Image (cartoon, rainbow, N blue to C red):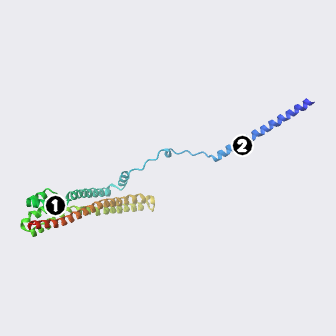
Amino acid sequence: MKKLIALLTVAGMLSFGLFNVAIAQEETTATDDTTTVEQVVVEEPVAEVPATLEEPVKQDAGFHEVLKEQFIAGGAGFMGIVLLALIFGLALSIERIIYLNLSTTNTKKLLNKVENALHNGGIEASQEVCKNTRGPVASIFWEGLNKYDEGIDVVEKSIVALGGVLMGRLEKNLSWIALFIALAPMLGFMGTVIGMIGAFADIAAAGNISATVVASGIQVALLTTVFGLIVAIILQIFYNYCVAKIDAIVNDMEDSTIDFVDILTKFKSGK
């Protein structure tokens, strides 16, 4: 009897233990299921990245590439004419800049050389110095020395006359540069007006005012104005540089000729 009671007790304890284990396993399974469900709910599947987005981002095009694309988009008609205005204007500007830089002279140094040659070798030695020096100032000095025998008054008149001629040479082709400065934006505006006329023609053909109908036409039309203004700005910078350079040379001519006449006057008086 005792053995039977002991066996039943052991069996009951084992049954209770197995029951607790089963319950614990069920709770663990339920917890795992809940966690899995939560993970499924929280961790939504990530959408696949399109192949185009996985590709490396292309670098921005260079300024010259953008400029070329916009130039082509503006049309070959007026854009080509604006480009020709830029080419001719730059050619004339570069020619003037080279000429003006070659015409620049160190007048103080030249005056010292002329004065020393005048006292040491006379008129011929001074003329040789002027002959070997380039620039309008040296040409004026040579002309003044050439008229020295006719008197100081004649020297002054010859200097003034030659100065006007040389000043006209310095300003040569500036009027053409000014023409291209005015012509480039005017051509751009004309291209814009013609493009707007085409845009309104597209509106009339479509029968409605839609941005998709007129946007591309207006954009192309405005490109001619933009390029025309760019050309005018570039040429205006070169033009102003040439004008400033001419003013500086003319001022040097006027100041140096005054000193030159004084040197000739002192030399003639034997001082």
Q: CA distance from mark 1 to mark 2?
A: 107 Å
The dot on residue 31 is: 2
Q: Is residue 73 above or below residue 243?
A: above
The amino acid pointed to by label 1 is: Asn
Residue pictured at 10% horizontal, 63% vertical: 145
Q: Is residue 227 above or below residue 26?
A: below
Front residue (pair 88, 4): 4
Front residue (pair 187, 43): 43
Residue pictured at 16% horizontal, 60% vertical: 112
The secondary element bearing badge 1 is classed as helix
Observer-side mark, 1 or 2, equals: 1
* Quadrant of the image containing the N terminus: top right
Q: Quadrant of residue 172?
A: bottom left
Residue pictured at 26% horizontal, 63% vertical: 244
Q: Residue furthest right?
A: 1
The amino acid pointed to by label 2 is: Thr
Badge 1 or badge 2: first in the primary sequence: 2
Q: Is residue 161 visible?
A: no
Q: Position of residue 127 (x, y in %)?
A: 10, 59
Task: Please give the residue where the numbered disc 1 appears in the rendered image.
Answer: 112
Q: Is residue 256 above or below residue 91?
A: below
Q: Residue furthest bottom?
A: 153
Residue pictured at 90% horizontal, 30% vertical: 4
Q: Residue furthest left?
A: 149
Q: Is residue 82 left or right of residue 151?
A: right
Q: Badge 1: how crowded within 10 Å, few (<14), some, or many (20+)?
A: few
Q: Is residue 87 left or right of residue 264?
A: right
Q: Position of residue 216 (x, y in %)?
A: 41, 57
